[in-house]
Amino acid sequence: MGKVKKMEANTRSCTKCGSTNIIVDPDAGEEVCGRCGLVLNDEVIDTGPEWRAFTSAERESRTRVGMPRSYALYDMGLSTSFRGGRDARGNKLTVDTRNMMNKLKRYDTRSKLDDTWSRNLSIAMAELDRLSTVLSIPKMVKESAAFIYRQALKADLIRGRSIDAFVAASLYAACRKNKVPRPLKEVSKASTREHSEVSRSYRLLHRELKLRMPIDDPMKFVSGIASKLHVMPATERYAVDILMRARERKGLSGKDPRGIAAAALYMACIEMDDKKIQKDVASAAGTTEVTLRNRLKGLEETLRPVMEMGDEAIINATTQ
């Protein structure tokens, strides 16, 4: 049973019986008349703190605050706002006071955007927000991209170069760092700059900021390529099994993970009689047919001893 409390007398009365015995149930979010049981409000908002305190010192050290700081906002969310025509008591401001507040608002806006750093960040964060929306980037990755861009700006890497290109490069670096599968071509396509400029900016970021990127696993690209080709689930599972066997034989090192994934999926299509042509597989993987054939040849050489023993049992296991 939720804890209920009575409202103070003469603050509100029941619209049906006129009783002032109003009971508030914070767990159910309702205000109920204590005499007739009429629900007066079913959308009660809890304005209390979101934290707990067990001592007076702990209670005094905690306060309610606004939104947390965000690297994706050019001022990290610590902005000043001048709005409304009334004071704290609800009284209308005089004409002189309103004019003074308008002047303060203009000075505040000019001081924020007068600095080169703030102006750069305001443009960059707007572009980052657009790219993140187009590419469906998670919030955590977006924050990481904003942090990388701020590091590049602090290192003076963007002077004389394109802001949009560095935003796209920072977003791609954040995707790689957080293991989110977004290829560079896809990021460049959503950006306003050319692919060559974005890739050049990424190489500069990687070299100057000494970024340590994890190696992409080819298996994480299989599902995306398979969904574009509409292959059978058994074919997709068999492609993953091919990659696992190739990894055991050290056959994935030093190769493009998307090309390896496409080759494994094409090999699985051949084995499972799921007819797909090389052109479609290469297009779905974002690679070329030449790369697909080269990676396919490498997989066949790596798995030749296993294929000679026969993998009829593996095919039957994937079809079950």
Image: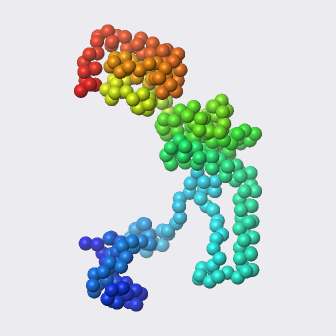
Q: Nearer the viewer, residue 129 or 66?
A: 129
Q: Position of residue 22 (x, y in %)?
A: 34, 84
Residue 205 at least partly seen: yes
In the image, is 195 to the left or to the right of 55? right
Residue 173 at least partly seen: no
Q: Nearer the viewer, residue 223 or 15?
A: 15
- Residue at 34% over, 90% down: 18
- Residue at 36% over, 85% down: 15
Q: Position of residue 118 (x, y in %)?
A: 70, 53
The count of marks equals 0
- The quadrant holding residue 83 is bottom right
Q: Nearer the viewer, residue 69 or 113?
A: 113
- Residue at 42% over, 16% down: 299
Q: Position of residue 5 (x, y in %)?
A: 33, 80
- Residue at 57% over, 40% down: 171
72 relative to 94, above or below:
above
107 relative to 272, above or below:
below
In the image, is 241 to the left or to the right of 180? left
- The quadrant holding residue 115 is bottom right
291 relative to 6, above or below:
above
Quarter the C terminus occupies: top left
Q: Position of residue 266 (x, y in %)?
A: 41, 20
